[in-house]
Image (cartoon, rainbow, N blue to C red):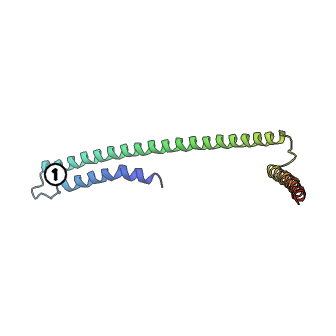
Amino acid sequence: MRLLAPLFAVLLPCLAVQAEESVNLPLLQPSSAGTSQTSTAPAVELRQQLQLMQAERDQLQAQLQEQKQLEEQKQLQESAQVSRLRQENQRLKLQLKAAQAGQPARWLSEQQTWFALGSALALIALIIGRLSAGLGKSRKHWLN
């Protein structure tokens, strides 16, 4: 499917040129005299046009072959790059697993650490609040 667009792009101008040439061609009219000179001139001209068209067709076929070869080379390079990237990805995954296995196991996860820290802070706040409330009662009691 990808090759159709470049092929049309190459063939479309050629078809337009061919259509213009076919419009400009003189029509063969049978001569009543049947002279060989008048009948051979259009035949020679037609042969020359045929040779030109065949040369143009050969040139277009060569261009098409070159494009196919370039596309095949590009696909080979891409497939080689994809396989290389897959191998590198596998290697990196193995390195990551090895690095994670080499680390010592944590006593608490990060979430558990923050929970313990918050609990400790709440406990300290409760102790300070009780101590300060106890001092306030003794002061009120002292004033009465």
Task: State left or right for residue 135 relative to residue 58.
Answer: right
Which residue is tagged 1?
39
Considering every residue shown, the one lying at the far bottom of the view is 144
Residue 89: x and y in percent read 69, 43
Q: Say how many tags the image has.
A: 1
Q: Mark 1 is on which residue type? A: Ser
Q: Residues within 10 Å of mark 1 (few under 14, many from 20)?
A: some
| Residue found at x 32% / y 45% | 56
> Along the line of sight, which residue is nearer the eye, 140 or 131?
140
Q: Quadrant of the C terminus?
A: bottom right
* Residue 96 vertical position relative to residue 17 in the rendered view, above or below: above
Task: State left or right for residue 49 relative to residue 91.
Answer: left
Residue 71: x and y in percent read 50, 44
| Residue found at x 53% / y 42% | 74
Q: Secondary structure at mark 1?
A: helix
| Residue found at x 79% / y 43% | 97
